[in-house]
Amino acid sequence: MIATMHVPFVDLKAQHRALAKDIESAVHAVFERGDFIMGAAVEQFEAEFAAFVGSKHAISVGTGLAAIELSLRAFGVGPGDEVITAANTFIATVLAIAAVGATPVLVDMDRDTYTIDPGAIGAAVGPRTRAIVPVHLYGQPVDLDGVMAVAARHNLLVIEDAAQAHGARYNDRRAGTLGNAGAFSFYPSKNLGAYGDAGIIVTDDDAAADRLRLLRNYGQRVKYYHAVFGTNSRLDTVQAAVLRVKLPHLDAWNASRRRHAARYRNRLPKRVHTPAETAKADHIYHLYVIETADRDALQQKLRARQIDTGIHYPVPAHLQEACVPLGYKAGDFPVTEAAASRILSLPMYPELTEAQIDYVAESVADALE
Ligand SMILES: Cc1ncc(COP(=O)(O)O)c(C=O)c1O
């Protein structure tokens, strides 16, 4: 019997402690300047994030949800259009499609990667389909060659939901830069997290970038002159200042997550299903999701050993109460549904120690005995 040790699911305080001095001085500089809305740090962060992912433009917004919604609006998606996305996603992807007045069309996932199945997209395309929103779920890049081929065949837009995939690579390009636009969330626990809500959109499309800058800021290019019906979804200058301090560390943090994933894989018992790695992509393990038959019992036993875990997500989007009007039923997406009762997210964050990983792996082995 091994000694008990607390392993939190994520540890935002550990990351803050490591950067506290730099963050406090960056935030203090904003206080001193007083440029709280669309201040200097916002434009600086946008330029730095665009350079980081390798896109021409980066337009910051208030949340990841707004990043997806405004991307769809900027490319003209709206009422009467259908937009295809995965049933296995966080609800925000579906809400963003509905928010522009389009109809979300959900499809099943690939069994190995937990991301949208390009074959299922092809089967769901109809005369009203305008766009695909592939989700790089858990930090695993979608099979974008497959998705882009379907999009090209049917002349569809591709808006990547990269909310869980900051810095992940596919065919040596960063997630978010392969489609028409990529949407990111900086929710605090994301691989790159702000100290509150925040998001950004990346695109190489000049016209869409211009429209996004209008849409997020009351539709105005010049103050009090409103060109379109926009909204208020701007990145706070304070959040931009925090994100500027953190961005240079992102690749190293992702490398740590990948190291932790490799250690989990080596130490977890063989009967546990561990995440797949594919030849074309670098999974950056926003979440480390395993599968077992007795998921709920395993979760309880880990809790008894002070190991915090999560389930992402317990109910697939098509079976959520909010999605009843979309008309789906149990059995529509068997791959997604079968996984939902088996998946368990183990603790994963850059500051996790080898001792903690070994303790979690041993505890899983003991629990399954
Ligand atoms: C896949 C996915 N899409 C969209 C979002 C929405 O981001 P936010 O919470 O910043 O609105 C999130 C995270 O919350 C997410 O995980």
Image (cartoon, rainbow, N blue to C red):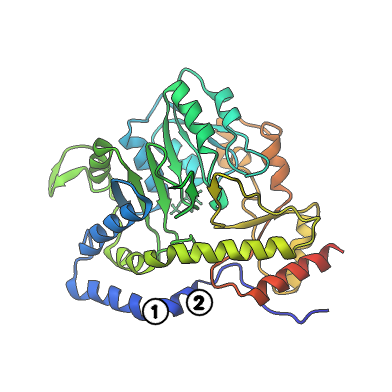
Label 1 with label 2: CB-CB less than 8 Å: no
Residue on which disc 1 sits:
20
Is 332 situated above or below 264? above
Label whose residue precedes the other's in the sequence (1 or 2): 2
- Give the residue displayed 44% in from the left and 78% down from the top: 18
Depth check, front residue: 303 or 249: 249
Query: Could you classify mark 2 by the number of other residues whose Cα lies within 10 Å: few (under 14), some (14-19), or many (20 or more)?
Result: some
Element under disc 2? helix
Quarter of the image with the N terminus in it = bottom right
Instruction: Please state which amino acid type lies under the numbered disc 2.
Output: Ala
Determine if residue 129 is in view: no
Image quarter of residue 101: top left
User: Which residue is depicted at the point 83% across and 62% down?
Assistant: 368
Q: Amino acid at mark 1?
A: Ala
Determine which residue is flagged by label 2: 14
Q: Nearer the viewer, residue 163 or 223?
A: 163
